[in-house]
Image: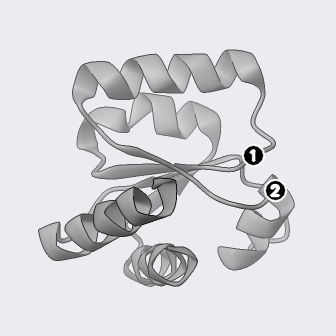
Amino acid sequence: MVKILEKLIRDAIEDGKCTFGTKEAVSTVKNSKLIVLSHSIPEKILEKIQEVSKNSKVPIVNYDGSSVELGRLCGTQFRISALSLKTLSDTNLKALTKELEIETK
């Protein structure tokens, strides 16, 4: 899953079709196809993002690293706890969910 997720994040950044940060993720969840969360996100914010994304039926993926690692993946110098991907093809989304199902079994 890591390879697919990293490729999706890099492609979204190149296209400029993503937003960084927890506040941005909450405010743009209706226009998002996927939300990526790091392991170091605060519990209160995590609950809020989960609630908003559940209401909007936007899937959430937990990144297997810290906010520092997610920030490095995005090519920034700062930490990123949440990332909202605005455009994502259905094929890529299905491939990612299929990988997630395999990993959870």
Q: Distance between the residues labelled 2 and 1?
A: 5 Å
- Residue 88 visible in the displayed image: no
Q: Which amino acid does label 1 sit on?
A: His
Q: Between 80 and 98, which is closer to the camera in this rendering?
A: 98
Secondary element under disc 1, as helix, strand or loop, is loop
- The answer to the question of whether label 2 and label 1 lie on touching residues, with beta carbons closer than 8 A, is yes
Q: Where residue 33 appears, x then y in whole percent? A: 27, 52
- Residue assigned mark 1: 39
In the rendered image, the quadrant that contains the C terminus is bottom left
Circle 1 residues within 10 Å: few <14, some 14–19, many ≥20: some
User: Residue beneath label 2, please?
Assistant: 66
Q: Quadrant of residue 72?
A: bottom right
In-image side of 36 versus 53 (left or right): right
Q: Is residue 29 above or below residue 84?
A: above
Q: What residue type is labelled 2?
A: Ser
Dividing the picture into quadrants, the one containing residue 47 is top right
Q: Nearer the viewer, residue 77 or 36?
A: 36
How many other residues sit within 10 Å of disc 2, few (<14), some (14-19) or many (≥20)? some
The number of numbered discs placed on residues in the rendered structure image is: 2
Q: Is residue 25 above or below residue 65?
A: above
Q: Is residue 81 visible?
A: yes
Residue at 37% x, 80% y is 15
* Left-right relation of 36 to 89: right
**SS state under label 2:** loop
